[in-house]
Amino acid sequence: MKIAAAAYPLDFLPDWAAYRAKLSDWVARAADQGAELLVFPEYGAMELAALGGAEVAADLEDSLQEVMRHGPQVMALHEELAARHGVHILGASAPAMGDAARPVNRAILYGPQGVIGHQDKQIMTRFEREEWDIAPGHGLQVFDTALGRIGVIICYDAEFPLLARALVEAGAEILLAPSATEALAGYTRVKVGAMARALENQCVVVHSPTVGPAQWCPAVDMNTGAAAIYGPPDLGFPETGILAETTLNSPGWAMAEVSREAIAHVRREGAVLNHAHWDEQKMRLEPLRERVKPS
């Protein structure tokens, strides 16, 4: 299959028609190049805050509420585009009301037949916890699709290996890592995490970031990143582990052909077998645990 990861800029859009036109154009350009799985970034939906006007977009709480107000329309548009082009789309994540009293950070996966499911971010950054008051999601899930088994690790979640490992042990072959990071250091943390997850799980990780300034919305005012598709640097994959990558802070699609059989093959025959040898860590750690037990 061909996978496309968006390096996506946030625009101050004047109305819903402008958002519809922008998203439709992005999806059409990727689909026209043969992409079957399209991945948009974390908090890419925050550009919808502009539809409430400059004052709404400039307020942290009001911007959340404005974006959530457009949730049903956003879902309908993604369903329409996925069906029209016969593609799978991980929509840009957005605030949504879950079981908690506060919004979660939710990414929805769409297929040609409609909504497949959603994944909420599990671990909040300091900004989300301390200033924005975004609630953590409850639990991970693997989506069994026509393209393979897919898991989602949103931004900071990609920096925690046990989350990705739980998805892989539940069958995930491809991990999607949408992100939104202000500084180069933040982008680098997610990039390094995503590449490490591809290495240790011998899988494909798709990294889609927001890029460029959006000073009209303080939640996402500066965005640094490059879209990329990573695999294990081993048999059947590039020696760098990078299948495709955009230029830093340049909007556009990173695209690569990905084979599920290549993932299965490297897990069976690779020069290293990180995926299979994961549990050996536990055996090696037991003597240390015994030595440091409190008396």
Image (cartoon, grey):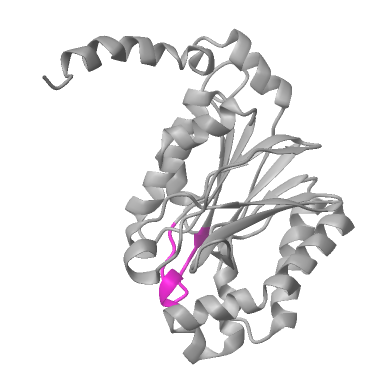
| Residue 51 in picture, x, y percent from top left | 62, 85
Picture quarter with the C terminus: top left
The residue segment tinted magenta is: 210-224
From this view, report whether residue 270 is shown above or below residue 145.
above
Residue 165 in view: yes
State whether residue 261 is above or below residue 119.
above
In the image shown, does 215 or 163 lie closer to the viewer?
A: 163
Percent position (x, y) of residue 263?
Answer: 65, 22
Query: Which residue appears farthest toward the front when viewing the image?
Result: 295
147 vs 67: above or below = above
Residue at 72% over, 27% down: 259
Q: Is residue 129 left or right of residue 276?
A: left
Picture mark count: 0
User: Predominant secondary structure in magenta?
Assistant: loop
Compare residues 238 and 111 and report the one nearer the observer.
Answer: 111
Residue 147 as seen in the image, left or right of residue 241: right
Residue 241 visible, this orientation:
no
Residue at image location 71% in from the left, 67% down from the top: 23
Residue in the foreground of this view, choosing between 189 and 160:
160
Q: How far across and how far down the image is residue 205, in percent?
A: 57, 37
Residue at image point 46% right, 45% down = 157
Q: Quadrant of the N terminus?
A: top right
Verify whether residue 213 appears in magenta.
yes
User: In the figure, residue 206 lies in which quadrant?
Assistant: top right
Residue 167 placement, left or right of 136: right
